[in-house]
Amino acid sequence: MCAGAMALGLAAPATADSQPLGRATLTGFASLPALTFVPGSEPSGSLLGTEPVNGVTPPFPGQPVQGFSGIARRHDGTFDVLSDNGYGNQGNSADFLLRVHRIKPDFAGKSVKVLGGFNLTDPRGFVPFPLTRQDRTLTGADFDVESIVRLVDGTYWIGDEFGPFLLHFDRKGRLMEAPIALPGVMAPENPALNGGTPNLAGSKGFEGMARSVDGRRLYPLLEGTVTGDPAGTLRMSEFDLRKGAYTGRRWTYRLEDPSHAIGDAIAVDEHRFLVIERDNLQGDEARFKRVYLADLRDRDRDGALDKTLVADLLDLADPRGLGGAPGTFRFPFQTIEDVVILDDRTLGVLDDNNFPFSSGRTPGRPDDNEFITVRLTRGLQADPRVYR
């Protein structure tokens, strides 16, 4: 822990809030078919070859509406969702246009409507390194965008994994300033590496990012462990939006197993965050897909944040059979990368379907983008600004 984090004080004593919550319940299910494309968009997937993948053959006729790796609530029943870098890595995603989609779930009809969206661009030339396209529309070969925060002024902060960088866009998706690097951390894809040695694994940058409830700070959370840090520990940093700079304060989130990854992070109040933690398995093999509550004031002896289990996404009660037959509902996707607080006891959770590669719901078939709501056994006592 850095001095700033240590200055927060000793770990708080255990309370009722530190006890695991009971079995959560599925209260809503909606799905967007995997084969959904942006109307009138450019073809994509030309670098994937021509062999079928889970029954679909690339290249594709348009830009798939897929890979929901971040979510921002708009407080009108709609959500902004972020597609990630495209087809899994920098080398095969140059024709995937980075995009924010606006969606509206219809839980009565079990469907998700795509209401529009916008591509991410850099028309003013803030990116200091060469981009894939001359028109400066950003692609999955330029950035791996994984987390999104929407401010009250309508602008967006997006977390990238290739730098890792923080990216600031206006309400139309136009970059507003140069990418902001995380001091002391470089992934292999970072263009400033210049033959140096990275200290973060590829695409292990800002998978999660929370905004403070007062709107003044960001808390980006790495997906991977920085070289030299204990195995399975992830750095959460603090970024001051008014100063446009990192504060130097840092905390540590410890994975239950070093092979796990985080999927998203969101603020609950001034001190607490929800974090999705998952294994890398899917379908019947999936064993670990959970939502934890982490408190900046509550740390174990090694300085890592203590965690409280909030929901096991592989063991949700489904008495009404909203997700199939009544009984137990599983959310068995390889990557689950979106959590949003809908009210003090209800979470929204979405998968990243890694189109066309993931097939956690039905073997041999590309996963849909699913949006579920989950009712907790007790309230989070969240700051009302989080969901109002």
Image: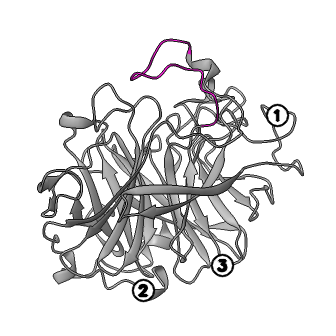
Sequence order check: which comes first, mark 2 or mark 1? 1
Label 3 environment density (alpha carbons within 10 Å; few <14, some 14–19, many ≥20) = few
Q: Which residue lies under the disc numbered 3?
A: 152
Label 2 vs label 1, nearer the camera: 2
The amino acid type of the residue labelled 1 equals: Pro
Q: What residue sits 13% from the left and 70% below the top? A: 22
Sequence order check: which comes first, mark 1 or mark 3? 1
**To which quarter of the image does residue 381 belong?**
bottom left
Q: What residue sits 42% from the left and 40% below the top? A: 353
Q: Using the image, tell me which numbered label, if any, was put on residue 130.
A: 1
Label 1 vs label 3, nearer the camera: 3
Label 2 environment density (alpha carbons within 10 Å; few <14, some 14–19, many ≥20) = some
Depth check: 92 or 108 in front?
A: 108
SS for dot 3: loop
Label 1 environment density (alpha carbons within 10 Å; few <14, some 14–19, many ≥20) = few
SS for dot 2: loop
Magenta-tinted stretch: 49-63
* Membership of 111 in magenta stretch: no
Tell me the quarter of the image containing the N terminus.
Answer: bottom left
